[in-house]
């Protein structure tokens, strides 16, 4: 039987089910993630064919760069998804999942760009930019 992980935005206008194994959490400290959320992203991902979204008409996609888009609820503003062009998976923000999530921490990326108002004090691997 395949794992099913459920989640939604703050107002419930967008609900999703992620089927299958989820990747370990990546904590992204880039300026775009910080500006969208106020801190940093904690995200996992799921293969596109394992993601079912109800209320997709309530998702607005913002092209924050030439290579990816950020999906958020147009009603409440909840950050939900990150999608790189040409890849077969979608990143999902960890905070959007219902408990229990069973999500595990993985590593930090774009640490050179982290905000000057917090510290990264765990023992997870840290990468100056993206992980290659």
Image: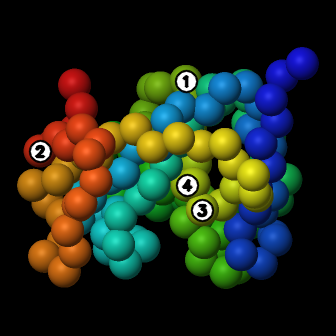
| Element marked by disc 2 | loop
**Residue at (55% x, 66% y) in the render:** 79
- Spatial CA distance of label 4 from label 2 is 21 Å
Mark in the foreground, 2 or 1: 2
- Spatial CA distance of label 3 from label 2 is 24 Å
Mark 2 crowd level (few <14, some 14–19, many ≥20, 10 Å Cα): some
In the picture as drawn, the residue positioned furthest to the top comes out as: 1
| Relative side of 113 to 11, left or right | left
Residue 128 bears which disc, if any? 2
**Residue at (77% x, 42% y) in the render:** 5
Q: Earlier in the sequence, mark 3 or mark 2?
A: 3
Mark in the foreground, 3 or 1: 3
Where is residue 3 shown, x and y percent of the image? 80, 29
Placement of the N terminus among the 4 image quadrants: top right
Residue 88 bears which disc, if any? 1
Residue nearest the viewer, comparing 105 with 46: 105
Q: Earlier in the sequence, mark 2 or mark 1?
A: 1
Can residue 25 be seen at all in this image of the molecule? yes
- Spatial CA distance of label 4 from label 1 is 17 Å
Question: Mark 3 = which residue?
Answer: 95
Where is residue 85 shown, x and y percent of the image? 43, 34
| Element marked by disc 3 | helix
């Amino acid at each position: 039987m395949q794992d099913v992980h459920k989640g939604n935005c703050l107002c419930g206008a967008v609900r999703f089910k992620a089927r299958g194994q989820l990747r370990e959490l990546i904590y992204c400290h880039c300026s775009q993630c910080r500006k969208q959320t106020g801190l940093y992203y904690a995200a996992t991902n799921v293969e596109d064919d394992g993601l079912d979204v109800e209320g997709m008409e309530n998702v607005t996609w913002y092209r924050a760069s030439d290579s990816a888009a950020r999906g958020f609820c147009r009603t409440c503003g909840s950050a939900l998804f990150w999608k790189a062009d040409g890849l077969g998976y979608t990143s999902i923000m960890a905070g959007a999942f219902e408990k229990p999530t069973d999500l595990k921490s993985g590593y930090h990326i774009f640490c050179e760009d982290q905000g000057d108002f917090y510290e990264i004090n765990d023992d997870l691997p840290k990468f100056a930019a993206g992980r290659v």
